[in-house]
Amino acid sequence: MTTTATTLRRSNDRKVTNAVTAGAGVKIANAFGLPSGKRYSCPGATSVCEEKCYAGNLENMRPAVRSLVLGNLEALQAAGTVDAMADLLQAMVDAFRKDCDNATRKGWTIKRAFRIHWDGDFFSTDYAMAWARVIAATPDVHFWVYTRSFTGTVDVMPIFDAMADRSNLSFYLSADRDNVTAAVAARKVYPWARWAWLAQTFADGLAEMPASDVKRYACPENAGRIELITPKGSACIRCGICPDARGDVIFSIGKR
């Protein structure tokens, strides 16, 4: 594999962090982001998700966040090949693992969980395959990701084949009323994937989501049943539904 001096930057996402300080702050950055929207890294973006994209809104509100995710995309695009992109991603994940090791030595009990794309998505097949290599090479880290890149102008369906037998990956098809046909077709081929359904309300999500043989959940943080972050942990790690792929999940735009 090639070597590059360019580095990718992780994000301090309070909802997903695997290690929280005593003051309910982020101890370890365990999320990776790219700029949102079809113009950048989201070829499968739907009108529903583009209109309500919380990550895109955060980019607009915080120039530092915008700079971080744009820098990540530019570094990956400059790398170009699967090998070079995998090198960049692996170095970033190895830095996360080092942070986990340091925290463990200090007596912290943590889950080595890493969120791929708190912002953005798989923008090319080569980029998706680079992630598949990193996931396969890092079995001591559990990754989870939501994607709409099963439809749109970029074909990343081969990523499913590469990731199908990875026990350290939880894979969600992000779907809504605009891409339901493509989502259903993808899950028929890859039944191990889960739904992450976006609707106006939880009731709408239950009505719109196609039937499956796994349990359905309303995101507890989205529904206001658990806090975003506390000294006991972040919402996603305390909940565990998505990181552990326990079932299909509904997210409500109206939070009701």
Image (spheres, grey):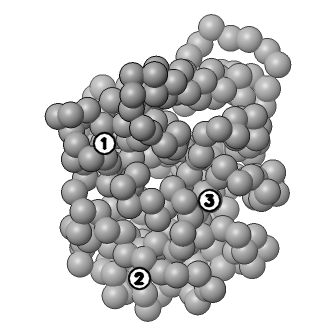
Category of crowding for the residue at label 3, using alpha-carbon neighbours closer than 10 angstroms: few (below 14), some (14–19), many (at least 20): many
Left or right of 147, for residue 90: right
Pick the front one: 167 or 60: 167
91 lies left or right of 29: right
Q: Position of residue 10 (x, y in %)?
A: 46, 29
- N-term mark: 1 or 2: 1
Residue 95's image quarter? top right
| Distance CA(mark 3)–CA(mark 2) | 19 Å
Q: Amino acid at mark 1?
A: Arg
Q: Which residue is disc 3 drawn over?
A: 171
Mark 1 or 2, closer to the camera: 1
Question: CB of mark 1 within 8 Å of CB of mark 2?
Answer: no
Check the picture and name the quadrant holding the N terminus: top right
Circle 3/circle 2 CB separation < 8 Å: no
The crowding category of the residue bearing disc 1, from other C-alpha atoms within 10 Å (few below 14, some 14 to 19, many at least 20), is: many
Is residue 185 left or right of 67 when viewed as pictured?
right
